[in-house]
Image (cartoon, grey):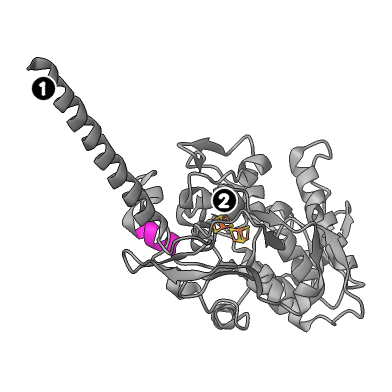
Amino acid sequence: MSLQLEIASCVRATSKFSDCTKCIDACPESIQLVDNLPSFANNTGVEAAACVGVCPTEAFSLSDFSTTEFFFSFLESKVRLISPKLNVPCLSVLSVEHLISLALASEETITLDLSSYDEESILYEHIKAHIEEANFVLSSFSSKKLETNADAVTEADKNAVKTNKEDEVSDRRSFLGNVSLKGVIKHKMSFDEAVEADELKTFALDPAIIAKIRAKNLPDKRKILFTTLKHAGVPENFEVLAEEDITFTSQKFVDDSCTNCQICYRICPTGALSSDGKFSLIHFDAMLCVKCRLCHDVCEPDAIQLQPGFEIKEFFEPTQRTLATFDIKRCNECGNNFTYTGGEQTCPRCLIEEEEAMFLHSNALSMKALFDDKKDDDK
Ligand code: SF4
Ligand code: SF4
Ligand code: SF4
């Protein structure tokens, strides 16, 4: 089993300004940055599996194990133990979203087997942190929780693991394909051409990879979470969790320093940020956000910010919020639309051209005056 990286899904390939190091932080011995992109030796295997569970855009995968297929096959089986000795290559391949979804979708309590991990290792800390976050989020709206144990796996557990049938696998794929977050992906098609080609050329990427980067995709783990939440009971009261306690999604606001440069909503890999055809607003859908932080990394004035609290209500009643609106007017000079902020109705490009023309004109006048003075002196 070996590690694979779909480079088009990595936010570092989308923008040279991305600071994402989640995979490197999780697997520092196996993954390094080379030319600003994650890199690892060809034979790297499950020892680096934590990057699979931690990557916000599911750029990493293992050659012979799919977390999506595991989600369904595990729920169909009779065991309620997840163990590297039984059914996963490593517990770290499961993201916080997978853990929450598994706990919600299972009638019985699920136990995670930590017996084979060294309690002093980074990997153990990483897995514990994921389980704690999943249980913390679950505790805000459900009585379900994940257990851990250090007991040996029994023969009965091994016998209970089922293999999957092909038609079930295809059912799962179509199930995920049909998941639709009502009204939240509707704008994404207009942005397929939007990622700046100049930025992508930085890495000399293949045109096929650039095409994939342009397509906005919601990771399967988010589709699974969204679907399991729809079947969970709606809590009577909705809690607000501290922003730093939730690593896989966020809520945001945009402050007055926003210039409507359009980069954040053009570049957002999932379509969580979007706009309308005139670029007159910024929409945000928290249920599409994977907290990759790309929008923050590319925003020059630092106008897009994380909301301090994450409202759990968003899980049950997803909304599309308008973070900013802009006054779009037609430029009196060139006729193109631009973000009007007052004063003359002239777009920034025409203003620059006007300033340059005035500079050249005054320069020409000065040169002429100098030339005339010299001619007078020579007489
Ligand atoms: S965690 Fe994923 S998105 Fe982030 S740098 Fe690694 S591969 Fe790229
Ligand atoms: S929030 Fe930042 S990146 Fe987004 S449009 Fe405004 S200035 Fe540009
Ligand atoms: S809104 Fe920002 S943090 Fe969320 S997925 Fe889009 S780019 Fe990433």
Find residue 328 and report its horizontal and vertical position in percent: 48, 70
Residue 132 at x, y percent in the picture? 85, 55
Q: Residues within 10 Å of mark 1 (few under 14, many from 20)?
A: few
Residue at x 76%, y 70% (from the top left corner): 102
Where is residue 35? Give x, y as percent: 45, 36
Magenta stretch prevailing secondary structure: helix
Q: Nearer the viewer, residue 208 or 333?
A: 333
Q: Is residue 126 magenta?
A: no
Magenta stretch in the rendered image = 208-214
Q: Nearer the viewer, residue 138 or 237?
A: 237
x and y percentages locating residue 1 in the rendered image = 55, 52
Q: Quadrant of ligand 2?
A: bottom right
Label placed on residue 240: none
Pointer 2 residue: 299
| For marks 1 and 2 on the same chain, the one whose residue lies earlier in the sequence | 2
* Residue 30 falls left or right of residue 110: left
Q: Nearer the viewer, residue 29 or 129?
A: 129
Label 2 Cα neighbours within 10 Å, binned few <14 / some 14-19 / many ≥20 = some
Camera-side residue: 192 or 157? 192
Q: Amino acid at mark 2?
A: Cys
- Mark 1 sits on what residue? 375
Q: Is 373 rendered above or below residue 294?
A: above
- Ligand 2 neighbours mark 2 (CB distance < 8 Å): yes
Q: Is residue 213 magenta?
A: yes
Q: Is residue 177 above or below residue 139?
A: below
Residue 146 visible within the image:
no
